[in-house]
Amino acid sequence: MNTDNPHLQAAIEAVQRNDMITATVEATKAIQGNPDCYEAYIIRGQISMAFGDNRGAAEDMKRALEIRPDLQEQLNGQYKNI
């Protein structure tokens, strides 16, 4: 993962602390700063899916795949229940 983005790094650290609210906020800030930050879409999508927001998870997965189509097989397993 690209950790040059301070908001992305903060989102990763928040996930590690199990602070999903902060992780979502930081992932969103990472996306606002860099709309091509696929890692932030993945983080936010995984959190959305965990909280039952299938629409949000699907939108974030779709955007991540638009940026990095080579991740399709990897992400397919994570989002197969949407």
Image (cartoon, rainbow, N blue to C red):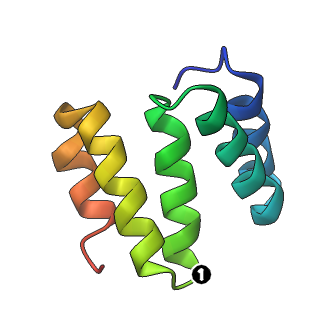
Residue 39, horizontal then vertical, whole percent: 49, 36
The answer to whether residue 48 is above or below residue 64 is below
The answer to whether residue 34 is above or below residue 23 is above
Q: Extreme bottom residue here?
A: 52
The answer to whether residue 44 is above or below residue 8 is below
**Quarter location, residue 21:** bottom right
Classify residue 79 as left or right of residue 6: left
Question: Along the line of sight, which residue is nearer the eye, 68 or 14?
Answer: 68
Q: How crowded is mark 1: few (under 14 residues within 10 Å), some or many (20 or more)?
A: few
Tell me which residue sits at (50%, 30%) in the image. Answer: 37
Tell me which residue sits at (48%, 74%) in the image. Answer: 49
Which structural element holds mark 1? Answer: loop
Residue 51, horizontal then vertical, whole percent: 59, 81
Classify residue 44 as left or right of residue 75: right
Classify residue 61 as left or right of residue 23: left
Question: Along the line of sight, which residue is nearer the eye, 18 or 41?
Answer: 41
Q: How many marks?
A: 1
Q: What residue type is labelled 1?
A: Phe
Q: Mark 1 points at which residue?
A: 51
In the rendered image, which quarter contains the C terminus?
bottom left
Residue 77, horizontal then vertical, whole percent: 25, 62
Tell me which residue sits at (25%, 39%) in the image. Answer: 66
